[in-house]
Amino acid sequence: MKRTVFRSRWLPYVLVLPQVAVTIVFFFWPAAKSLYLSVFKSPPFGGRDIFVGLDNFAVLLTDPGYYASVVNSFVFAGGVTVLSVAGGLVVATLANQKLRGLAIYRTALLWPYGIAPAVAGIIFLFIFHPSYGILPYFLSFVTDYEFNWLLKGWVAMTLVIGATAWTHLGYNIAFFLAGLQAIPTSVMEAASVDGAGPVRKFTGVVVPLISPVTFYLVVVNMVSSFFGSFGVIHAVTQGGPGGATEIMVYKLWKDGFIGLNLGSSAAQSVLLMAVVIGLTMLQFRFAEKKVTY
């Protein structure tokens, strides 16, 4: 194995310096600032911060509205992760077939990843709109039930889950396609010789071999659902109706920037970070055991 040698001993540090600087400025510094503000009461219009200890956390943990946002976050993140990962796997499997013009299809499938979350939310808003949306129109022929996201919380949650999952779909398809194309042809041929059908080959050969990719995408989509879903909620439902789509990241923004309660907002960001870190650790602790490397 050839060892890379730099002419200057400082060159490796210079090369990684931009990434280190970005990490410090956009992650460690905001995280440290949130930890600081979470134990203080900060006047919204300036003034001296007042140390309150864990009072901000105590108020949150006795607030039913905060627990409702936690439940909404788990429902939202779970729905987005399952829908985007499962949908990405199905579409990637279909896109891995030998078809004419397959490159064009694959390019079109990756496009949703380039759409901003707020724009995706507006697109789905038109699809779900109770007056001129195409989905309520077709559902009106099947049932008399009114699918109005302005009045029914579960319809609004379905809307934002679908919009967010759609934006994740292109990213998942790209990784699943790479994983599927890395499976040796000889393995699939051996499964066929053993008499395995399409379903058996998919469940017994394909799924285990791409399990590292699946595990990675589950973790990434879950984290992104907790942190990166603000745009869809803010552009479409703004946490409504009746707080049905008010997830943790939106509530901390609303309390901090609308309610000007910086201490509570910082405490919520710390709890959100703790929840996501805890979920990620649990996935690595238990789910990774089922991954075939």
Image (cartoon, grey):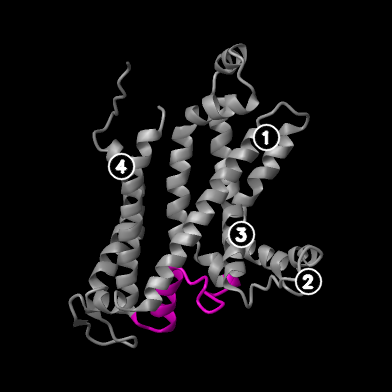
- Mark 1: few, some, or many residues within 10 Å (few <14, many ≥20)? few
Q: Which residues are magenta?
A: 235-261
**Can residue 116 be seen?**
no
Question: Depth-wise, is mark 2 or mark 4 nearer the camera?
Answer: 4
Residue designated by label 3: 163
Contact flag, marks 3 and 1 (Cβ < 8 Å): no
Please name the amino acid that badge 1 sits on. Answer: Leu
Question: In front: mark 1 or mark 4?
Answer: 4
Residue with the mark numbered 1: 94
Position of 217 with respect to 30 (left or right) is right
- The answer to whether residue 72 is left or right of residue 105 is left
Separation of marks 1 and 4 at Cα, in angstroms: 32 Å
Relative to 83, residue 131 above or below: below
Q: Earlier in the sequence, mark 2 or mark 4?
A: 2
- Inspect the image, locate mark 3, and give the three-letter code of the amino acid beneath it: Ala
Residue 259 on image: x %, y %: 41, 84
Q: Nearer the viewer, residue 194 or 128?
A: 194
Q: In 3D space, how far apart are the residues under numbered discs 2 and 4 (Cα atoms)? A: 47 Å
Which residue has dot 4 on it? 285
Q: Position of residue 151 (x, y in %)?
A: 63, 78
**Which comes before the other along the chain, label 3 or label 1?**
1
